[in-house]
Each structure stands twice: as structure tokens, then as C-alpha cells.
Amino acid sequence: MIDLKKIKKIHFTGIKGVGLTALALVAKDMGFKISGSDVAESFVTDEALKKAGIKTQIGFNEKRIKDADLVIFSAGHGGSENIEVQSARKQAIPILSHAQALALLVKSKKAICVAGVGGKTTTSSMIATVFQVAGVHPSYAIGVGGIRPLGLPAKFDKKGKYFVAEADEYFSPPPDSKPKFWYQNPFVAVITNLEYDHPDVYKNLEHTLKVFAKFIERTPKEGLVLVCIDNPNTEKLIQFWPKTNRPLDEIKVPISTYGFSRKADWQITLIDKSEEKISFNLKYKNKVFKNIELNIPGEFNVRNAAAAFAVGRFCGISPRKIREGLKAFKGTQRRFELIREIKGIKLYDDYAHHPVQIKATLKGARDWFGKKRIIVVFQPHTYSRTKALLKEFSLAFNEVDLVIITDIYASAREKDNPTISGRLLAKKIKEHQANVVYQGGEKEVASYLGKIAKKGDVIFTLGAGDIFKWHNSIAKAIERNQK
């Protein structure tokens, strides 16, 4: 057991990753001296680290950890086999993975943990914003480059009793190899949705359900499990309990539901949508909370806001303050983020990489932008996901006017797979969406958009790879052709 009172300096190996950046910001607020190493490549977290005054040492070297009392590492850059981690092990310096470190830093607070295949970043950010606006002094660690209006994606506040964190279902790097969120002990557990994802570590949907069930099982009876009932797989989750083979309602874990469904405890009863505006009503028992306004689009974000509202009320925040917080929330980096406007053409970016996320994002885009022409550039992420969900991906783009598919962004954790490709995905999508083209990489995409984009268009880049780095090339190509 690591005693934080004995720790003075923490070194982060792979500090630019969104998870480790958030932890580094929290640790800095807690009073620890911070150092970190990573590659020279630009990341979405560069600005956050710079604002926090945390310098990144480029490259990995065993000398980096010479005066560290604790080393925290990410799954990237070799994980536990990284030279810095190996050196720490030889020197008997304590070592923790991201998941283990997050659990340790959260330990002193009541944890609000948000899990799900899509929605957890935005929902976590909404909850943190609501709590901040309400003066509750939240701590939070959210895996994103920045949050509007909070600024930095993480903070530790000694005054508050709550800590808001994403709960990641992916497996920790070897030799641990268990779901990351199993290290967390939620006081409030939010499940935004459930889908079969990460086929490289999960056998099937049932395997996923069992892992999530074990996560929410850790919630105490004085806490809360909040589940979006609109998703059929979350409904399955609350109908069984793998550990005891009994339904969840027979176990003393308080469960509440939210969504559009009439079954929901927190029921979304009305949405008012007009171009680039949205508001909704939320019914709980015999009370209706009316005209809750959002400055971000999409029915999926209405669900996220409903979850934030329910969590806020459970933690004693007034409806008025919750409304203020939700209205103040302007989104996060890589979540329906407006990058820039070029000659009357709007360029947006979103992290959506699973078919369910893509469909929700593009439905939100269509609602938000009405009849404007919407062009989507999608960079598939991982061979295993693309192949396993090929049919689902083929049906995910029907809301838009033109789809551009790139080459697959391969994860470091898998090998090339010649049986699946971006070209094949484009061919499959074409069975359901006539307007789809394949453009392999950054140069091809930028050149193509430069030729076909016109004033009034809305362009989205989607994916969990490096497509967010292509925006300058796309903007320059459009500018050249719009003169």
C-alpha cells in the first residue's frame, strides 16, 4: 500500500495521454512535484500541460526517474516494459498504472464514476461543470484536452467531498490485464450506455455486461447507480447480477434510471429543437423540471444532461443551480468541437469511433444544422473493431450528405490485418449510402475537400486516431480553392 504522505515527487511516463495528463494536473493541485516524459509528437493535451506549468521531457530515459518517489505509467510506449518503468522496478520505486493511480488519488473523496461506451467524457464534464457552478468545490479527472468553461480537464479541490471521474472499461496493460474501472469504488456510478466494443479484449456482449455488473456492484447502499434505460443493453444489465445470479433489485444497491423511455425514473418528456438551439423538460416522480437549456446539440447530449441533473439532485444541488451549470457548459475538446470557419465553411471535430457514437453524433448534427450539406471524414480506429462491427459501421452514416473514409488507424496493441481496410469499409457503406468515397490519408482528404467544399457546408472529422491533426491541411486546401 502506497502512503501518499511519504510521496514528494511523481513522474508520469507517457504524460501526454489524456488519462495521465488529468492525473498529473490532479497531483499538482495536491501539492506533489511533477515530472513527465513522452514523445515529441503533438497531442491534444499539450495546451493543458503548458497552462498548468508542467514541462514534458522528450524521450524515455532511466535518468528521468532518479529523484521520483512514485512512477505512474500509461498503456502506451511499452506500458510496464517502458525503460523508465523497468528502471523504477529495479530501484524499488513504487509503480502504478493509470487505473491504480486514479483509484489512489480519488480515495479521499466520494467518487462519481461515469462509465459507458460513449457519453462518459461529456457526462463527466457536465457533472463537473454543474458542481463547479453550484459552488460544491468538485475535484475531477476527465480524459480530454479541455472543458468549456472549466478550462483544464482536471482539478483537485481540498474543500469539496466529490471527485468526478471517467470509468474506463478497457483492460489495464500487462501484467495486470483487468478492467481499469474495477479499481474504482463509486459512491455514484453512472452507466450512459452499453455496446459490444473492444473485441480485442471482450469475447462478446455478455462478457461486457458481466464486467460492467461487477463494476457497479462496488457501489454502497447509501450511494446510487444511475443507468440510461433507453439502451437495450443497459436494460439487460439491470436484469441480472452475475455474481449472485439474482436481479439487481433484490440487492441493496440503489438503482435509478433516466432517458426518454416511459420506464425511466428521470424521464425526458419534451425537447424543443430549432437550428443551433435545444431545451428539454425532465420529469421525476410528480415533479417536472421545465425548460432546461443546453448550448450543445443532440438528443444524446440531452440524455447526458439528464444524467448530470439526476446526479446533481442526488448530491443535494438545487434545480436552479443545476440549470445554470448545464447552460454554462459549452462542450469539450474533440466532442462536437467547432475547430474553425473557413470562407463560410464550418469545420467540426468529434472523437466518435463506435457505430453507436457515430449515429448519435450525426443525428445531432442533422438536428443542429437542418438542411445544410454535412460532409463527414471518418478515420476507422483499430482493425479488430472495424472488422467486428463492419455491418454496424455500414449503417452509421445515413444522416449525412457525403462520407469520406480513410485508411484504418492501427492501434499499437494489434497487428495489421489484410482482411479489413478503409477501402473495404467504404465499399460496405456504399450499400446503404450512395455518396461515399475512399481517400486514404491526410493529403488525399485535404485535396478532395479543397475541391468539393462550398460555402454553407459543415464538415466533420470523426475518429479516435490522429485525424484531429489534419485540420490545418484541410483548412489550407479549402482556403486555396475558395479564393
Image: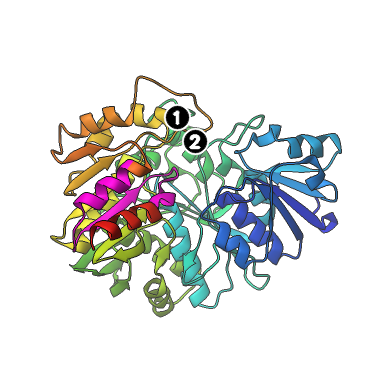
Quick check: 373 above or below 71? below
Secondary structure, mark 1, is helix
Q: Are marks 1 and 2 in contact (CB under 8 Å)?
A: yes
Residue 350: image location, x then y, percent = 37, 53
Q: Which mark is residue 215?
A: none
Q: What amino acid is labelled 1 in the image?
A: His
Q: Nearer the viewer, residue 110 or 444?
A: 444
**Where does the image place residue 160, in percent across and percent down from the top left?**
62, 71
Q: Nearer the viewer, residue 451 or 154?
A: 451
Specify the quadrant that holds the N terminus.
top right
- Which residue is rendered at x = 40% and y = 78% of the image? 324
Left or right of 33? Residue 383 is: left
Q: How many marks?
A: 2
Q: Please give the label number shown on residue 211.
A: 2
- Left or right of 436 on screen, residue 318: right
Res 99 visible: yes
Is residue 158 found left or right of 209 in the rendered image? right
Q: Quadrant of residue 32?
A: bottom right
Residue at position x 42%, y 39% from top?
247
Q: In this rendering, does residue 222 appear at all?
A: no
* Res. 442 image quadrant: top left
Judged left or right of residue 143, residue 444 is: left
In this figure, which residue is indicated by the disc labeled 1?
207
Q: Which residues are magenta?
A: 444-470
Membership of 451 in magenta stretch: yes
User: Neighbour class for label 1 at 10 Å: few (<14), some, many (≥20)?
Assistant: few
Secondary structure beneath label 2: helix
| Mark 2 closeness class: few <14, some 14–19, many ≥20 residues within 10 Å | some
Report x, y in % for residue 424: 27, 27
The answer to which of 442 and 224 lies nearer the viewer is 442
Residue at the (56%, 62%) spot, across then down: 47
Asked if residue 295 lies in the magenta stretch, the reply is: no
